[in-house]
Amino acid sequence: MTKTFLQIRGIRKVFGTVTAVKNVTMDVAEGEFMTFLGPSGSGKSTTLYVLAGFQDPTDGDILLNGQSLLSTPSHKRNIGMVFQRYTLFPHLSVGENVAFPLRIRRRPQAEIAERVKAALKLVRLEGFEDRMPGMMSGGQQQRVALARALVYNPPVLLMDEPLSALDKKLREEIQFEIRRIHQETGVTILYVTHDQEEALRLSDRIAVFSQGEIDQIGTGRELYANPATRFVAGFIGDSN
Ligand code: ADP
Ligand code: MG
C-alpha cells in the first residue's frame, strides 16, 4: 500500500463576502498526476495558491508526509509552481531565471551550473543559458518556467493552466513534454485546467471542481463511466 503523501483537509477560503473555496479535501499519492478540472470561478487556482502558501486558508490544513505546511512560508515549502502567463524575469537570462530558486537557497556556484544544465536538458533547451526570455517563443518560455520550477527537485509541482495561452499545436506538444517529464522525474503534479480533453490526456486522477467544492475524484475512465453528478456528466461528456 502506498503511504499518504499529500493530504488536503477541509480547505475553505473566504475573501470578504466571496467564498472562493467551500470545502476541499483529497489525498494525493506520491508521484501522482492529479488534475483540478472545472469551469472558471470554481476555486481551482485559490486551492493551488493555498497549497503554494501564497494565501492562507480560512479553515483547513495541508499535510505533506504527515506534517502541516501551514506554518511554513511559501519559499520554504519546496513546491514548484508554473503559471498561465510566462512569469520569467525579463531582465535575466534563461540560465539566471532557472538558477533563481538555487540562488535564494544559497547553493554553491558549481552545483547551480550543473543543476541549471540538467534542468534545461530535461525541458529540451540545452545550451539556451545565455538567451534572453524576450527573444524566445511562448512555448519555449513555458519550458524555461518549467525548468525553473523543477531545478531544485521539489517533491510537488503545481501548474495553473500553464498551456492556456498557447495555440493548439504547441499545447499538444507541451502536454507530451509534461507527461514525459512527469515519468522521468516522478514528481507529484497538481495541475489546473478547464479543458477536459487536456485533463483526460494527462492525469492519473481528476478532481472535478464546482462552486468551490469537489463533485467527484477519479480516473478519467471512472468519471466518464460513473459520473456522480449531472455536473460531472456534463463537464466530462461535453465535447468542445
Ligand atoms: P478558478 O481558478 O477555478 O477560475 P478562482 O480560485 O480563481 O477560480 O476563483 C474562485 C472564486 O473566488 C471566484 O469567484 C473569484 O472571483 C473569487 N476570488 C479569487 N481570488 C479572489 C480574491 N483575491 N479576492 C476576491 N475574490 C477572489
Ligand atoms: Mg484559475
Image (cartoon, rainbow, N blue to C red):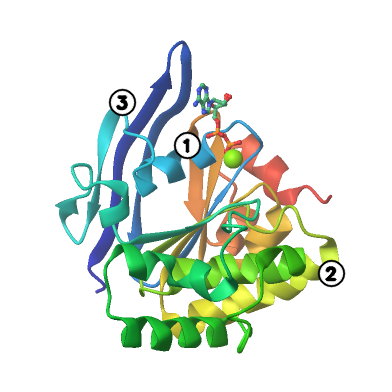
Q: Nearer the viewer, residue 193 or 232?
A: 193
* Image coordinates for residue 176, horizontal then vertical, percent: 67, 77
Which numbered disc covers residue 169? 2
- Ligand 1 image position (quadrant): top right
* CA distance separating discs 1 and 2: 28 Å
Q: Are marks 3 and 2 in contact (CB under 8 Å)?
A: no
**Residue that badge 3 annotates:** 58
Residue 61, quarter of picture? top left
**Residue that badge 1 annotates:** 46
Tag 2: amino acid: Lys
* Image coordinates for residue 88, horizontal then vertical, percent: 58, 59
| Label 3 SS | loop
- Which residue is rendered at x = 45% and y = 45% of the image? 48
Assess mark 1: CB under 8 A from ligand 1?
A: yes
Q: Nearer the viewer, residue 76 or 108?
A: 108
Q: Residues within 10 Å of mark 1 (few under 14, many from 20)?
A: many
The answer to which of marks 1 and 2 sits earlier in the sequence is 1
| Label 1 SS | helix
* CA distance separating discs 3 and 2: 40 Å
Residue 49, quarter of picture? top left
Q: Is residue 135 left or right of residue 91?
A: right
The answer to which of marks 3 and 2 sits earlier in the sequence is 3
Tag 3: amino acid: Thr
- Which residue is rendered at x = 37% and y = 81% of the image? 112
Q: Is residue 38 left or right of residue 190?
A: right
Residue 155 seen in this snapshot: no
Q: Is residue 105 left or right of residue 218?
A: left
* Image coordinates for residue 136, horizontal then vertical, percent: 74, 69
Q: Are marks 3 and 1 in contact (CB under 8 Å)?
A: no
* Image coordinates for residue 234, horizontal then vertical, percent: 72, 41
| Label 2 SS | helix
